[in-house]
Amino acid sequence: MKFRTFKTIKQEKEFFVTVRKRVHEKLNDTNFKYGGYAFWAKGLFWSLIAYGAYFLLFQTKNDVIFWFSFLLFQIAGLLIGFSFGHDASHNTAFKNKNANHVLHFFSFLTIGIDPLLWGLRHIRSHHLYANVEGSDIDIDKNPFLRLAPSHPWSKKHTYQHIYAPFVYILALLHSVFMGDWIYLFSKEYDWMRNGVSKKHLYVRYFLFKAVYFSIVLILPILYTHFSIGFIITTYITTSAFTSLLFVVMLVGTHFFYEAEYYQPLNNELESSWAVHQLKTSCDWNPNNKFARFLSGGSNCHAAHHLFPNICHTNYDRINNIIEETTSEFGFPYHKKTLFEMMVSHFKHLKRMGQQVI
């Protein structure tokens, strides 16, 4: 990974000082850094839905009910990760870091992505350098999709806005089976694992995967009435639907038509850290209660990138402050509906699919 420096620009510095002061003043009546009642109620709700659906797997002999119960378990399990796991990775669920680590581990068990590896790349790469080539892992070159102008073009990319959904349904399974393995063992990501012992990484990885696959495959195979083939097929197909939901809620928050992408010739970026976050993030329905409930605050992406140390259940109180302050200082604030964001994303894919001349 290439480490970058952000510019110190007086007006941009004043913007962040101002917006931070206004946000803290707005939230001074709450312990805003950590999860409160709304945070725990939402996370427990999705946990009850997920494990209630999981319990039903062992009670039914009907294959249709089994399949839909597995789908509900997968989707609600994903939303546990959105509601609990994401905040835990930022240490905003508990004051105690060890408690956050425990919550992070268990809230990702219904998703299957190694929480420690995900947290390392999310915090050490993406949150620092969103949309920066060579620094943000999330825009690493993709063999199927050209997501940034710095990526090489090939003829197949001409049609990527058409076949992208078929790639997206495999995103979750790829992360579970291949992505984690690459992040754990590839020398390319030594920088990401720096400071964490190999023993700790390996024990956590293999323990996590053993528990995850026991939950999603081994226990259903051993204790339900369905064939191994049907259970594996159910796991793969419901993972595909869950993956699509996962991608729809997240992919357009950085890969949208107006987003900026960077491949600096030297190590200096053109903006300050705060304004960089605004230029590379998109909110979708940020003031919609159901959207926030569903997405764990990932629909309020500007708020999350500017204030990653604030629990997501407080974003509804600061979205307007961010929008008003960016307008006051003349900086971009990207806000769309979910539909508009996805349209913008596919417009971006189509543009990236055009041959580079």
Image (tube, rainbow, N blue to C red):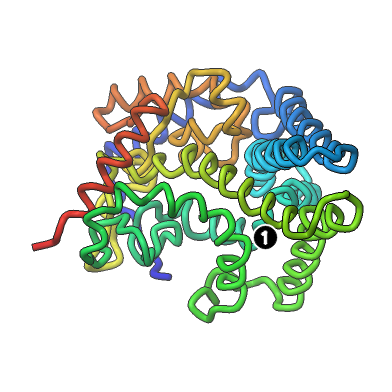
The residue closer to the viewer here, 347 or 162, is 162
Q: Which residue is mark 1?
A: 114
Residue 139's image quarter? bottom left
Of all residues, the one furthest to the bottom in this rendering is 187
Residue drawn at (33%, 31%), measured in percent from left and top? 334
Residue beneath the point at 78% across and 35% down: 47
Crowding at mark 1 (Cα within 10 Å: few <14, some 14-19, many 20+): many
Q: Whole-percent x and y of residue 214?
A: 82, 59
328 or 129, nearer to the observer: 129
Which secondary structure, mark 1? loop
- 239 versus 120 height, above or below: above
Q: Position of residue 58 (x, y in %)?
A: 88, 43
In the picture, the quarter occupied by the C terminus is bottom left
Vertical position of residue 245 compared to residue 167: above or below: above
Identify whether 258 is placed above or below 176.
above
Nearest to the observer: residue 190 or residue 67 = 67
> Is residue 84 visible from the viewing direction of this image?
no
Give residue 121's quadrant in the image.
bottom right
Where residue 231 sits in the image (x, y, percent)?
75, 53
Amino acid type at image mark 1: Asp
Drawn side of residue 10 relative to residue 134, left or right? left
**Quadrant of the rendered structure where residue 136 is?**
bottom left
